[in-house]
Structure formats: C-alpha cells, structure tokens
Amino acid sequence: MNDVVKRPRNVFIALVLATFFTFGLALVSGHWIPGGTVAVLATLIAFVKARFVIGDFMGLRGTRAIRMFDIWLLVACAVCLALVYRAMVAPGL
C-alpha cells in the first residue's frame, strides 16, 4: 500500500483507539483517577482528535489554512480547559 492509503487508515485507527481510551477514563473516573483529571484529559484528547480530523480528513494537511485552524483549536481548547478548571474550583457557580 502506498502512503496515500496508509495515513488515513492509521489516523482513523488512532482516533478509534483515542475514543476507547477516553471511554475507559470515564469508566474509572472517581475510582482510581480524580474526576477533574479525567475531564482535563478528555478535553485534551478531544482537541487532539479534532486536529487529526481537520488535518487529514478535511484535506488541510500541508496547506496554509491549517495554521488558522491550529490557532482556533488552541484558543477553543484553552477556553474549554478554563471552564473545566472553573467547574473544579467552584462547582456551584
């Protein structure tokens, strides 16, 4: 197989494995790993998966547009992590 076929297949397999890993984290949340840590890890995994989808399945890998999406993803991830942190520090707000 050539690289044109291998890369999307490998990325898809990585996305599925990351989904199963996130599901496993959710199952052990509160038992072995604190819930806040699981929320942060799940958020980071979701944004890494989004980066792979944008780069590989939307056809933006190697283009200039990927930089714009990288910046957008970083800002969105930072906002989500800030909201998760706020929920962990002051859950009643």
Image: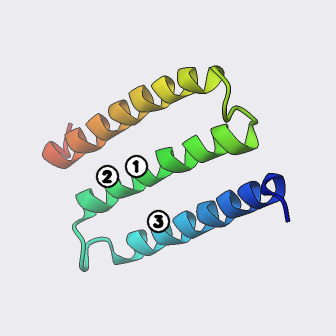
- Disc assigned to residue 13: none
Label 2 sits on what residue type? Val
Residue drawn at x 74%, y 37% is 58
For label 2, the SS is helix
Along the line of sight, the residue nearer the viewer: 55 or 32 = 55
* Residue furthest left in the image: 89
Q: Which residue is mark 2?
A: 40
Disc 2: CA contacts within 10 A as few (<14), some (14-19) or many (>=20): some
**Picture coordinates of residue 16 (x, y %)?**
63, 66
Name the quadrant of the N terminus: bottom right
Colour setting: rainbow
Label 1 sits on what residue type? Leu
Q: Which residue is mark 3?
A: 22
**Picture coordinates of residue 83 (x, y %)?**
30, 37
Label pair 2/1, CB-CB below 8 angstroms: yes
The earlier-in-sequence mark between 2 and 3 is 3
Disc 1: CA contacts within 10 A as few (<14), some (14-19) or many (>=20): some
Give the CA separation, mark 2 to mark 1: 6 Å
**Picture coordinates of residue 35 (x, y %)?**
26, 63
Give the CA separation, mark 2 to mark 3: 11 Å
Disc 3: CA contacts within 10 A as few (<14), some (14-19) or many (>=20): some
Relative height, residue 16 to residue 60 (above, below):
below
Residue drawn at x 35%, y 57% is 41
Q: Which residue is mark 1?
A: 44
Label 3 sits on what residue type? Thr
For label 1, the SS is helix
Question: Quarter of the image holding residue 10?
Answer: bottom right
Label pair 2/3, CB-CB below 8 angstroms: no
Give the CA separation, mark 3 to mark 1: 10 Å
For label 3, the SS is helix
Along the line of sight, the residue nearer the viewer: 75 or 52 = 52
